Amino acid sequence: MNPALQDTLLQLFEQVRHDPDTLLTLPVEDWQEGSMEWRLLTSFQGMLEEVQHRTHQLKQAEKQLSEKEEQYRKVFEATSDALVILDPHGFYVEANPAHCLMFGYSHDELIGLHASALAAPASFPGLTESMEKIKAGKEFQTEGLGWRKDRTVFHADTHLTPFTYQGKPHRRELKHLTNGRQSHGGQDQPR
């Protein structure tokens, strides 16, 4: 390879490495049009323009994705229905404020708990059935008894839906109180 061309290419690579967003002006006029050196530099320029174009598109897509995630986060946080995300084994990985309020737990207390910790014992058969259906990729809806942190019991409708969260299978749970029946204070005793 021509030593002058080699030096030119090394300088260009170094400039791109330090500032990949700046489109360089390549010294193609220093070489005879059609020569091997000229073709190499013009090809490099074309490749660099394409990489910068794709990098710009990727940054735009990342920005749009971040904006969408923020919108969904705000809806998740603001809804009055209790929403949670459970991993495939039934452990809470995310919960909205309405769910925390419904059960009397802080967000940090709730994350990592198993769904069975918030179900009154009378609801365990339904909980087991719901996990089996979700593992099979099916939706599940039931009415059951929820168990608050203070161990009061309440009736709630639960709708479980399988979906992908952070690239892995999870289930989304929507829960709301049933027809105003909110508490049955000691019907089920703590385990």
Image (tube, rainbow, N blue to C red):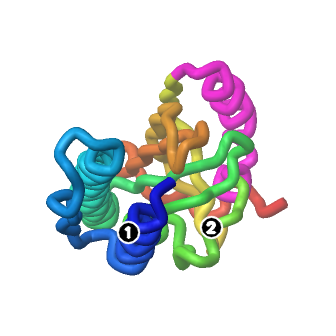
Which numbered tag is attached to residue 92? none
| Label 2 or label 1, whichever comes before in sequence order | 1
Q: How far across and down, in percent of the image, does residue 138 sit?
A: 55, 20
Within 10 Å of disc 1 (Cα), the crowding (few <14, some 14-19, many 20+) is some
Mark 2, mark 1: which one is toward the viewer?
1
Q: Nearer the viewer, residue 131 or 136?
A: 136
Q: Which residues are magenta?
A: 115-138
Q: Nearer the viewer, residue 12 or 188?
A: 12
Q: Nearer the viewer, residue 35 or 191?
A: 35
71 is higher (above) or lower (below) than 101: above
Q: How far across and down, in percent of the image, does residue 116 sit?
A: 72, 50
Query: In percent of the image, x 55 and y 43: which residue is there?
Result: 167
Instruction: Report which residue position mark 1 lands on.
Output: 8
Instruction: Residue 54: tell me if it is visible.
Output: no
Q: Amino acid at mark 1?
A: Thr
Q: Indicate the quadrant where residue 29 lies.
A: bottom left
Q: How far across and down, in percent of the image, does residue 16 sit?
A: 37, 70
Instruction: Report which residue position mark 2 lands on.
Output: 111
84 is higher (above) or lower (below) than 158: below
Query: In percent of the image, x 60 and y 41: which residue is there?
Result: 168
Does residue 128 show up magenta in the picture? Answer: yes
Q: How far across and down, in percent of the image, does residue 73 sit?
A: 32, 62
Q: What is the spatial separation of the Cα atoms under label 2 and label 1, in whole angstroms?
A: 56 Å
Q: How many marks?
A: 2
